[in-house]
Amino acid sequence: MDTPKKNPFSLQIDVSRFEKATEEEKRQQDVMSESTTFFKDGMRKLMKNPLAVASMIVLILVIGTIIIAPMVVPYGYEEMISVNGKRDKTAKNLGPFEYSKREQAVIDEGGSVFPHIMGTDSQCRDYFIRVVEGTKISLSVGLFASILVLIIGVLYGSISGYLGGKVDLIMMRIVDIIYSLPDMLIIILLSVVLNERLANSNNPVIQSLGTNMVSIFVVFGLLYWVGMARLVRGEILKIKNNEYILAAKAVGAKSSRIIRTHIIPNCISVIIITTALQIPSAIFTESFLSFVGMGVKAPMPSLGSLANSAREGLQSYPLQLVFPAVTIVLIVLAFNLLGDGLRDAFDPKLRR
Amino acid sequence: MSKYLVKRILLAVVSVFVICLITFFAMNAVPGGPFNSEKALTPAVKATLLERFNLDKPIGQQFLIYMRNMLHGDFGISLKTGRDISGTLLECFAVSAKIGGIAALFAVIIGVILGALAALFRNKWPDRLIIFLTTLFTAMPSFVFATLLLMVFCIQLKWLPVWDASNRSLVLPVIALAAYPTAYVTRLTKTSMLDALSQDYIRTARSKGVSTVKVIFKHALRNALIPVITYVGPMLAYILTGSLVVENIFSIGGLGKQFVQSITNRDYPMIMATTIFLAVIMVVMNLLSDILYKVVDPRIKLD
């Protein structure tokens, strides 16, 4: 077949000057990396970050201990040590792996006593199980408070950002005012008031949680969501002005579809990261309040209240402070590092 | 600029008002009045007392009277001690301000030095050490750190007295209060210093033959300090809240101790006064640091 006469200035390709690729050359193309999804790519980056992986391991270990320890350890967190059904008053302020006189007697007779891994406290309670229970309570407070913040913040922020205009202006002024209130003072104030108001309440939820816990959640619901709301609003405003949203609108996409396929996937990572970083701050707040004496109700331990009650015997039994203190630091550190790792791996703005 | 100033001051005034509102009505929501005590009062005496403290008026009017007295510096008297509250507050504030001020200064100076060092020695061992320490301190609640300090230096090593009248006993509270802000300032300075060092004007200065010391101090550090200024407001707020526990642990008679004590005593006028006082300080500090930021950095658009 003869090719048509080619114009010297034409850009038309001269097919005769090309040759077919060999099999080997074709195979070279296959070496290129396989396509990944956003999530897979993020996870791969996260797994490469040693600090984030270590934090995950720590958190898994802590959560594992919370689940397993109460099944293995035969003591309850508010139960005083008893030997042969009788209360053992000698089992007071024991060191780690120490036995009281009466327990020792049982062991000498050939019986077995479960060791007190972290010793016992001033009221003859096994300290290990108290620390485990305290960790459980502190973690769940952190988690639930963060979920509360997540829900309120995302709803408020997305409404404000999506509607825009005057509504946005008014909603954001309210956020500005709440943002400038000193949160810790308001929490303490509300705890004082709610304590008095709810003290005689027969509501089973309040009874079991204690009024201080209820006020912590109330305050988180009232004050702490503003950071999340600002963030979500900012993200939505930014995404809303992108060309692809305009394009989607031009093609005739419904706003429900735009929210579902364009806006949510684009800001979900920022929301998750902020929630992960909110948990340690909630744990901080709870332990702070417990330390001031405004946290969980008396027999119930939290890491903060354990550290607080260890203060009285600080001179003689410093380990009772060290255990809860180290646990708080470990958990907060792990969440912070994991949050940073998640940000590095998933935040689209930091991607290179 | 003036528009921004007006807006910012207005916001501060509204916040202070909202705080007063919340505090006043929260305290009024507590069941039981101050004269429902165990001693039965005759109706006539009670009526006189109520009238004396304006408790017979509608709540809205009570609020206005409280606000008016407050603006004149009169917070009423403490239920516990019977003393004038504003006098007690000022006394305590002097103590807290001394410790808090030293802690804030310490945090800024040490934080900037460490942050600049970390940026200059990027990815070498001083950087890694500093970052390790700051990460640790941002994860440690102030009460944990304060109690650990007390345990190690006062009880185990006996280097410092737990409490005496000399300034030596202020060392540990100041360190305990300053730990978190120092770590934060360090991180902030490092980030902004790295940012400043990668700018074109640094390269220009270097290529002109300006000495390294001069480049660091005159060109890089000066620009890197601007974000630190924005943190001054939140830092003082943190130090104030931190003083609630630190002053209790070290038994220092400052605002923080007063506040926690008044809560334990259910001394409502005192709680109210301390909350408003602390809140006003925080709001004013935030306002000042925001304004300062705008003044210092001409690159920020003033709208």
Image (spheres, rainbow, N blue to C red):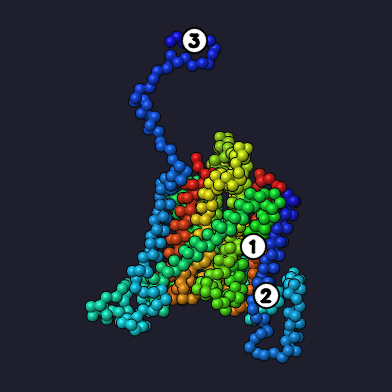
Which is nearer the eye, B191 or B207?
Answer: B191
Q: How crowded is mark 3: few (under 14 residues within 10 Å), some or many (20 or more)?
A: few
The amino acid type, in three-letter code, at marker 3 is: Pro
Q: Numbered disc 3: what chain?
A: A
- Assign the N terminus of chain A to one quadrant of the image: top left
Q: Residue A181 carries which label?
A: 1
Along the line of sight, the residue nearer the viewer: A249 or B269 = A249
Q: Name the amino acid, label 2.
A: Asn
SS for tag 3?
loop
Q: Is mark 2 on a helix, strand or loop?
A: helix
The chain ID associated with circle 1 is: A
Where does label 2 land, which residue?
Answer: B28
- Within 10 Å of the Cα at label 1, are there few (<14), some (14-19), or many (20+) other Cα atoms? many
Residue A14, how many percent across, how many down?
47, 14
CA distance for labels 1 and 3: 81 Å
Say which of A130 and B230 sits in front: A130
- Image position of B189 with respect to A149: above or below: above
